[in-house]
């Protein structure tokens, strides 16, 4: 039950905060010196943690060659059947990792069933997709390429495209030097995932969590207090302020139409997961409209009111709403500069498969 999950999470957060109280954190999230934290900072540390510099796990390859290859593949439209759609089409780096559409438009102008969440900081989530069907960004990256509604390709098509360009063959050999034959479909996901693990967007809230009490304005601190007081923190925790749990949610638009997305139930078949969706990250939330899993709400203020009412049973006052919005605005970070620099992709050859639009 959501209430039990929230209680367990809150208790764990309190224990975590107790061990951190009075400490300040560096960019690498390690305590460096004991300094007094304010009561509000200590409260924030019961559910939040500063962002790490990247999302690589211990033992993962983080070579420049692998990350650069992943970036090229992220922006490569020729992986799609039409030669038109890339990962960046739905997760546009110029618009904070989203396409700013209610649902994405894929192959042959088909529409997907759910809103495309931001790829920024997504590697910090404990699962991928709204229904949590994939465990990490490496496996997630492979699915849209083959989805007939999205990029509509096949593994054979993807490999034919990459093998047709000698530069890609060389890039795979450089990125996977210990593999005899590295140009494999699975390695496409490994490379894209490596690039996505660099897409971390630190904010002033991270500085605040590390001990800089002046990183937030007084009004933003009031917003943080209102955020906690309303109970928003019970779901939106961890370094990404979300992406770690599932909650039952039927949007107002779904209720009005009677067409309710089964959510995680489609993956698990468990009735307890019917209409359950991954709690989204709040990082860069000001920039990642429209909102909710169906992309049915465009205003962040309205979304905050709807979620507070539907999930917390709370009617926020206009003042509370405005304060929370001020805090959420402080969660807007900076897109990594390397992600905003477009890669120059290899030229097609006579062997490169031609676009197919049907």
Image: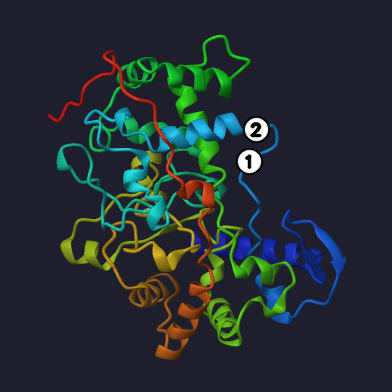
Within 10 Å of disc 1 (Cα), the crowding (few <14, some 14-19, many 20+) is some
Q: Position of residue 6 (x, y in %)?
A: 56, 64
Q: Position of residue 192 (x, y in %)?
A: 48, 35
Element marked by disc 2: loop
- Residue found at the far top of this picture: 180
Residue shown at 65% from the left, 72% from the top: 44
Q: Which of 129 and 152 is in front in this view?
A: 152
Q: Name the residue under label 1.
A: 56
Within 10 Å of disc 2 (Cα), the crowding (few <14, some 14-19, many 20+) is few
- Viewed as shown, does residue 303 lie left or right of 47? left
Q: Which of 185 and 170 is in front in this view?
A: 170
* Residue 36 appears in the figure: yes
Q: In this view, does 344 lie above or below 230?
A: above
Q: Residue 258 carries which label?
A: none
Using the rendered view, name the quadrant where residue 141 is placed: top left
- Circles 2, 1 touching at the beta carbon (< 8 Å): yes
Number of numbered markers: 2
Q: Position of residue 125 (x, y in %)?
A: 53, 49
Q: In this view, does 155 lie above or below 18?
A: above
- Viewed as shown, does residue 44 lie left or right of 124? right
Disc 2 versus disc 1: distance between alpha carbons? 6 Å
Q: Where is residue 123 in the image (x, y as percent from the top left)?
A: 54, 45
Q: If the image is split into quadrants, where does the C terminus sit?
A: top left
Q: Mark 2 points at which residue?
A: 60
Residue shown at 51% from the left, 42% from the top: 196
Element marked by disc 1: loop
Residue shown at 62% from the left, 61% from the top: 9
* Residue 184 appears in the figure: no
């Amino acid at each position: 039950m959501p209430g039990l999950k929230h209680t367990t999470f809150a208790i764990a957060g309190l224990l975590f905060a107790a061990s951190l109280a009075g400490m300040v954190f560096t960019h690498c999230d390690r305590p460096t010196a004991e300094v007094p934290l304010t009561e509000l900072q200590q409260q924030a540390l019961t559910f939040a943690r500063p962002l790490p510099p990247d999302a690589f796990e211990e033992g993962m390859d983080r070579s420049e060659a692998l990350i650069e290859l992943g970036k090229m593949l992220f922006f490569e439209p020729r992986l799609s059947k039409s030669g038109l759609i890339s990962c960046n089409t739905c997760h546009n780096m110029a618009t904070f990792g989203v396409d700013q559409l209610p649902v994405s438009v894929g192959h042959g102008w088909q529409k997907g069933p759910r809103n495309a969440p931001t790829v920024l900081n997504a590697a910090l989530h404990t699962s991928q997709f709204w229904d949590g069907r994939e465990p990490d960004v490496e496996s997630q990256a492979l699915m849209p390429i083959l989805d007939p509604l999205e990029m509509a390709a096949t593994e054979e098509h993807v490999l034919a495209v990459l093998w047709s360009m000698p530069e890609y063959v060389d890039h795979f050999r450089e990125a996977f030097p210990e593999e005899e034959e590295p140009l494999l479909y699975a390695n496409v996901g490994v490379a894209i995932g490596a690039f996505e693990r660099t897409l971390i967007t630190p904010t002033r809230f991270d500085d605040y969590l590390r001990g800089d009490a002046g990183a937030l304005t007084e009004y933003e601190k009031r917003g943080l207090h209102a955020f906690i007081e309303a109970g928003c923190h019970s779901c939106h925790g961890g370094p990404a302020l979300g992406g770690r749990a599932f909650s039952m949610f039927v949007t107002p638009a779904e209720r009005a139409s009677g067409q309710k997305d089964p959510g995680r139930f489609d993956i698990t078949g468990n009735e307890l997961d019917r209409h359950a969706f991954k709690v989204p990250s709040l990082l860069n939330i000001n920039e990642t409209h429209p909102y909710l899993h169906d992309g049915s709400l465009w205003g962040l203020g309205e979304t905050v009111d709807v979620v507070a009412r539907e999930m917390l049973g709370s009617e926020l006052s206009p003042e509370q709403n405005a304060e929370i919005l001020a805090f959420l605005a402080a969660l807007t970070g900076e897109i990594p500069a390397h992600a905003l620099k477009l890669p120059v992709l290899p030229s097609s050859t006579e062997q490169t498969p031609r676009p197919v639009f049907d």
